[in-house]
Image: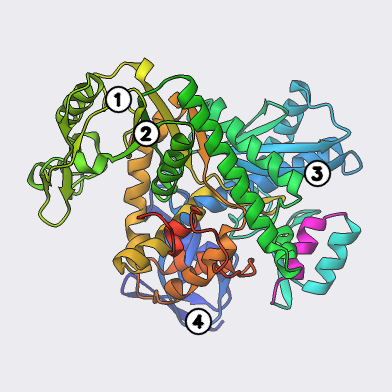
Amino acid sequence: MEKVKVRYKGKDYEYEKGTALFDIAKDFQGEYEHPIVLAVRDHKLKELFHTVKEDCEIQGFETLSGHSGHKAYKRTACMIMLKALYNIIGSDKLERVKVEFSMGDGYYISIKGDVDLTDELVADVKKRMDEIVADDTTIKKKSYPIDQVRRQCLELGMKDKERLFHYRMSSSVNMYSINDFTDYYYGFMVPSTGYVKYFDLKKYNEGLILRLPKRQKPLELQPFNDTPKLFNTMLDATKWDEIMRIETVGDLNDVISKGKINDLILVQEALQESRISEIARDIVKKKKKFVMIAGPSSSGKTSFSHRLSIQLAAHGMKPHPIALDNYFVPRELTPLDSEGKKNYECLEAIDIEVFNENMTDLLAGKRVEMPQYNFITGEREYKGNFLTMGPEDVLVIEGIHGLNDKLSYTLSPDDKYKIYISALTTLNIDEHNRIPTTDGRLIRRMVRDFRTRGASATRTLGMWGSVRRGEEENIFPFQEGADAMFNSALIYELAALKQFAEPLLFGITQDDPEYQEALRLLKFLQYFLGISTEDLPKNSIVREFVGGSCFDV
């Protein structure tokens, strides 16, 4: 039998030609804490059913705790759930099953059709999922001509997928199957159903929640953390998507191709302005003096705070924007993280004593000189910016710790109005493939970092893990304590960001650690038709990232 050489970590190994990566992975599983599910061969991520037919190099393996491996696990769990739903309920009764959005560590699933979603029915579906996992069925991948797939999608009533493939430039489509159940998935899958051992399914609201493990602990489920305010915010967004009949990328591409994108932009912007005005009215009605705004990276906090200030002024108030960054401690006092780097995202990086002293003095009617942080020298400066609060004055405070009461411990809850803002993407690729909210924010940040700081996409991607950890620690635990939530995502924005993000991602080479993530994002952006940003309103939150805003962002 002919042999091929496989280089791994600088050493050559011999295998028979045609050996599957699955079998090669077994030889190195002992080096990894968690099960291997993908391989990086010749700098490209590969599923384990692929075989080696010539000499090659394996740069490494991806386990369930890796970013791509964890996504593959969640994707496969969705497919198993869908197969179980169709097995138990039947395709004649299921009009639609849609993976809507993230809910905790899993997904919220909506169901339409002749279905009475009882606890007993959900238990039956969960039992069927357990059976599919126990069978450890190999997940097969096969390529089909795109025209054939489009015809089959129409015959099966899967209009969302037919629309998606209408705008796909390739001549073929990869479909996955578990025995007789076949579906399309954006991204890789694990080798077999037996890998998906850790999940739960429960009834929630009018749909289901598919609970899944955290990436950092892929072999266990965390306790369910209910977030009703966030859930209702996401649900409202999906309802607006339904009203506008733009629930998937294919729907959005239809609007773009028909030349109606400007109408969509105006409607989306009007909806956001209406929500901002609603929040401003609530602040005025409740006579709040301190508006605390917080949210994860690239949520559009700065543009939002400016637009909220305008609405507050329109309601007779005198808003004063305050950035918490101006209260950073001197740079040499900034705490260090676990890697010995300065941690600007922890609460201790803020001089909370001075902040509280200033806020209580202002509330008491005293004249206060406001600080400004010099990011070059790493020191707070005072340049005669004095502020005194009158009856109509309100402070609009924006920063990562705005929702944490430890930041404003001297201020009464009666004086504070907390706002959580995030770009909560509700647009799906198709009904079974959702767009992660984090992907939208990551692309926003990449475009803005390059425009404002000249930072490469490699640098932004390299920092993203640290940014996400900071959000998990300092923002998300406090989101349900907000008085209002604002979704800054715009349904058209990825089509606008595409033209700016793609060149940056193409600049990442295979020698960069971020290469696999760049390939994934490039593939993702291929689904969208691009649009010009020329006609975007000057106050649009998207302007904060692509440029041309009327605000100082």
Residue type indicated by callout 1: Gly
Q: Which residue is mark 4?
A: 3
In this view, 310 is above or below 31: above
Q: Nearer the viewer, residue 37 or 205?
A: 205
For image coordinates 20% across by 49% down, the residue present is: 339
Q: In 3D space, how far apart are the residues under numbered discs 4 and 3 (Cα atoms)?
A: 49 Å
- Does the residue at mark 2 contact the one at mark 3 (Cβ under 8 Å)? no
Please tell me which of labels 1 and 3 falls first in the chain.
Answer: 3
Q: In 3D space, how far apart are the residues under numbered discs 1 and 2 (Cα atoms)?
A: 9 Å
Please tell me which of labels 1 and 4 falls first in the chain.
Answer: 4
Residue type indicated by callout 2: Lys
Residue type indicated by callout 4: Lys
Q: Label 3: state its secondary structure.
A: strand
Crowding at label 2, few (<14), some or many (≥20) Cα neighbours within 10 Å? some
Q: Is residue 103 left or right of residue 109?
A: left
For image coordinates 85% across by 43% down, the residue present is: 95
For the residues carrying marks 2 and 3, which lies nearer the camera in this image? Answer: 2
Crowding at label 3, few (<14), some or many (≥20) Cα neighbours within 10 Å? some
Q: Which residue is mark 3?
A: 96
For image coordinates 48% across by 54% down, the residue present is: 539
Residue 160 magenta-highlighted: yes
For the residues carrying marks 4 and 3, which lies nearer the camera in this image? Answer: 3
Q: Which residue is mark 1?
A: 390
